[in-house]
Amino acid sequence: MRTPTASELLNVWERALDAPAVARGLWLLRLTDEAQGEDAWLGLSLGDRDARLLRLHAKLFGHVLQGVATCPACQSTVELLLDGEALQLAPTEPAVTEHVLELHPAGRDMAIRFRPVNCADLLALQSCGDVDEARRQLLARCVIDVGGEGSADVAGFSSDVQAELAAAMAAADPQADIQFDCVCPECAHRWQPLFDIATFLWQELHAWALRLLREVDTLARAYHWSESDIVAMSPRRRQAYLEQCAS
Ligand SMILES: [Zn+2]
C-alpha cells in the first residue's frame, strides 16, 4: 500500500468535505494504489475496503485508534482505545466472492446465491431515505440467483427470508462489521458500540488537515514560504520551524 503525500491528502480532504462518507473512503483509498481501476474500487467488498482503511489509518496516524462512545445505559462519555491491527481479520484465501444460503421456508428448499455488499452498492443507495427500501434494494443488488423453489424476486421474499439473508450477508463479510466489547467505567454496562473505520479515519484526517493549515498559516506569516513548500516539508522539520517561531 502506497502512503499518500500530505499534499494529496489535503487535496482529497478539500474536495471530499461535502461528499458522503462512502465516497470519502474511496477517494482516500484511490491515493494508495493509483494503478487500480475504478471498477476494482467500486467492486471492493465492504470488508476489503475496511481492512484497507485500517491499514491506511496505521500508515497515517499509527495503529492505535482513540475515540469516544456514549454509554447507552447512563449516557456517560467513555474513552475508547482500540488496536487497529487487532481489528483486522485474516483475509480468506482465495477471496470468496459468492455464497449460498440454503433455506427451507414452509418445508420448501431454497438456495439463494449472493455476493458481499460492495462500494458501488453503498454509493447507489446513499440517497435512499427509507431504511426498509434501502435494505430491499441492497438485497436485490446482491442476490445473484435463487435455486430450488424460490422466487428470484427479493420483493417476493418473506420478511423471515429477508432477515436470514441479511444475517448471512453480514456473516459472510465479518471485516465489514467490526465489533468489540465496551465496558462503561461509571455503571459497568457492557455493550458493542457501532464503529465505522471510514467515518473514524475521516474525522482524524479532518483534524489533521485543520492542524496542518494552522501550521501553514504560522510559518507563512513568519517566513513568507508558499503553502506547497510548507506542506511538502516533513512533519519533523515543520515542527522545528514552528518551535523557532514560538521561541
Ligand atoms: Zn454507563
Image (cartoon, grey):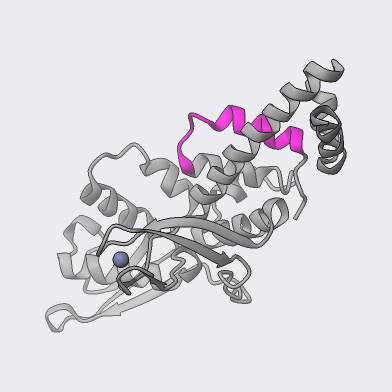
**Residue 226 seen from this side:** no
Residue stretch rendered in magenta on the structure: 6-21
Given residues 171 and 12, the one toward you in this image is 12
Residue 68 rendering spot, x and y as whole percentages: 45, 56
Say which residue appears at 42% left-offset and 47% top-offset: 122
Examine the rendered structure and indicate whether residue 171 appears above or below residue 21. below
Given residues 137 and 6, the one toward you in this image is 6
Residue 136 belongs to the span the image colors magenta? no
* Quadrant of the rendered image containing residue 191: bottom left
Say which residue appears at 30% left-offset and 71% top-offset: 187
For this view, does 235 lie left or right of residue 169? right
Examine the rendered structure and indicate whether residue 102 appears above or below residue 142. below
Q: Main SS type for the magenta part?
A: helix
Residue 9 belongs to the span the image colors magenta? yes
Hey, which residue is sitting farthest front in the picture?
A: 247
The quadrant the C terminus occupies is top right
The quadrant the N terminus occupies is bottom right
Given residues 25 and 83, the one toward you in this image is 83
For this view, does 112 lie left or right of residue 175? left
Residue 72 rendering spot, x and y as whole percentages: 27, 61
Residue 64 rendering spot, x and y as whole percentages: 62, 62
Quadrant of the displayed image that contains ligand 1: bottom left
Examine the rendered structure and indicate whether residue 95 appears above or below residue 3. below
